[in-house]
Amino acid sequence: MSIKHPFVSETHEGRPAFEWIVAALAVITVVVAALGYEMAATAILAATAIVTGLLRLLLRERSPWKVRSVRFDAFVGIGLGLGLLLLYFSIHLLS
């Protein structure tokens, strides 16, 4: 029985420098939220998600951000960003 593993390599999937920038923005989001600025933290995280989704959609295979297929990455990135913004503002509308 032969077990085949998927090909995963940093040289073929994404660019580590860009991925570290996204990770740094996630850490900044946590710090900003911990300081009590929830709207700013939500905006930073949503903007990061939307930008990564748009980059993947526009640059396709040359994109520095690759997780799965172009459609999947764009849908998840843009959808997460818009969903976070809608959730944040809907909570404020209810209160």
Image (tube, helix red, strand yellow):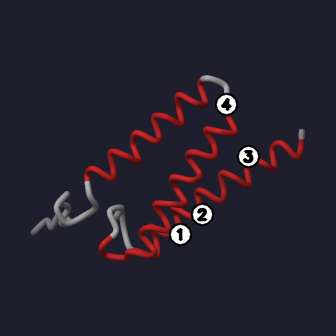
What type is the residue that disc 2 sits on?
Answer: Gly
Identify the image quadrant of residue 62.
bottom left
Q: Which mark is residue 37?
A: 4
Decide: few, some or many residues near mark 3? Use Cα within 10 Å; few <14, some 14-19, many ≥20. Answer: some
Q: Earlier in the sequence, mark 4 or mark 2?
A: 4
Q: Residue 59, position in %: x, y?
A: 38, 74
Residue that mark 3 sits on: 88
Q: Can you say whether 62 is above or below 76 in the image?
A: below
Residue that mark 1 sits on: 75
Q: Residue furthest left?
A: 2
Q: Nearer the viewer, mark 1 or mark 4?
A: 4
The residue sitting at 33% across, 50% down in the picture is 19
What type is the residue that disc 1 sits on?
Answer: Phe
Mark 1–mark 2 Cα distance, whole angstroms, equals: 6 Å
Q: Can you say whether 31 is above or below 75 in the image?
A: above
Q: Residue furthest top?
A: 35
Residue that mark 2 sits on: 79
